[in-house]
Image (cartoon, rainbow, N blue to C red):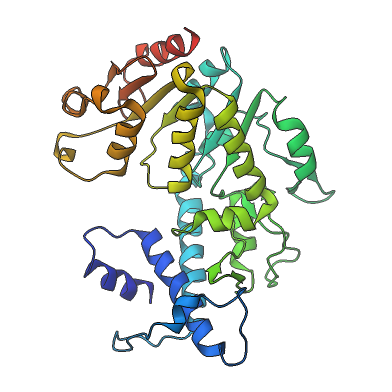
Amino acid sequence: MAKRIHDLLRSKYESVNFEDVLFALENLESYLFSKGSQRLLRSAQFDPVISAFTDLQTNIGIALDHQSISKARKTAIKNIFSRLVLFYQGLRNPDELYLKGLVKKLQKYFSLNVFTLNYDDLIDLVFDSWFDGFMEEQEGTAFSSFNGPEFLRRFDSEKNTLLHLHGSIRFGFNAPGQGRHINPGEIVKHHDPVAAMDSYIRTFSTEILVAGQIVSQDPIISGLNKLDKLSLNPTPFGYYYNAFTRSMVTVPNLLIIGYGARDPHINEWIREFCRVHGKDRKIVLVSLFKKDDIGKDLPIVNLSNDLMGIQNFQYHEMVRNVPNHFLEMGPCFRWVQSGFPFQSPEILDRIIKYFNQ
């Protein structure tokens, strides 16, 4: 079903990825649930009002009902989760990760509030004392529970924090007994991603809808309505997003690495960071443009233009110097035209010097 929906989207849009497919599945599910239950139930908690104005074409080659769509969406997320866990099993030696040198050097000069949108746990592995709010390990288990009030109390005083804003392959559920299906419950953090994956695969396929949006608690947040899921799943995601927005308006130094600017709920707070800190802000954006990107409507181009100001936006200069170049673009912005790892150690030294000026 996911493949068929992908093909249908590709017939209309030039670029389609797995998040578009999941978003389509979510919208179809809430729509079909509403159509099937609107005469029995009228509640804003479940009913997307658009269903009162639309009819769904049924000549798309697949049977559509909200149960089958729900199953397809869950299956897609489980496959994404499984592929991530299995792929990163071979990359779990911290000494071999380029991130270790980056984090270790930055820690010499700064306290770090790290917000990652990646599902993998590679950055978790480079440092064993990250604070993330998961601190209550039950006896006889290999996972920790999240403590919201304690997280709020300690977040500002901790030297190094790491928050997976969109979830992690270590997140799962309390799953006692091998092979037993479980209701999802509250998210916990497993030491072993394989155990986290197993706990998610064994969950019953239950959905929670609010105002026509699926907000079921999954270990990874995907699709295009991430803000709803962040806001309506407090533990840990609501606490994490709150910490992110507070950090953006209290800390004037911002290092952005490998971000494609495809999340509006992140972009708007980056813009707010610029507005609040004004001329005192310092931003370093690390990304790699290629010459064939010129002329493309890339979200990161639009965001960079906003952050730098049109007078400082040297797009052709940025793509000309590939792949390790440090560009000074106005007093408040530095662009690092580079992939990872930095081929020149000087790049990181210049980033640190800029933030310490």
Q: How many marks?
A: 0
Q: Is residue 147 visible?
A: no
| Left or right of residue 17: residue 248 | right
Q: With respect to residue 224, does 107 lie above or below? A: above
Q: With respect to residue 268, does 73 lie above or below? A: below
**Of residues 186 and 314, which is closer to you in this image?**
314
Image x and y of residue 54, in percent: 38, 83
Question: Residue at 18% across / 39% down in the picture?
Answer: 293
| Left or right of residue 195: residue 298 | left
Question: Residue at 45% across / 72% down in the picture?
Answer: 27
**Of residues 104 and 355, which is closer to you in this image?**
355
| Left or right of residue 286: residue 215 | right
Image x and y of residue 125, in percent: 57, 34
Question: Residue at 39% across / 38% down in the picture?
Answer: 259
**Of residues 306 and 28, which is closer to you in this image?**
306
Q: Quadrant of the N terminus?
A: bottom left
In the image as oriented, which residue stretches furthest toward the right? 139
Image x and y of residue 14, in percent: 21, 60
| Left or right of residue 192: residue 319 | left
Image x and y of residue 134, in percent: 72, 42
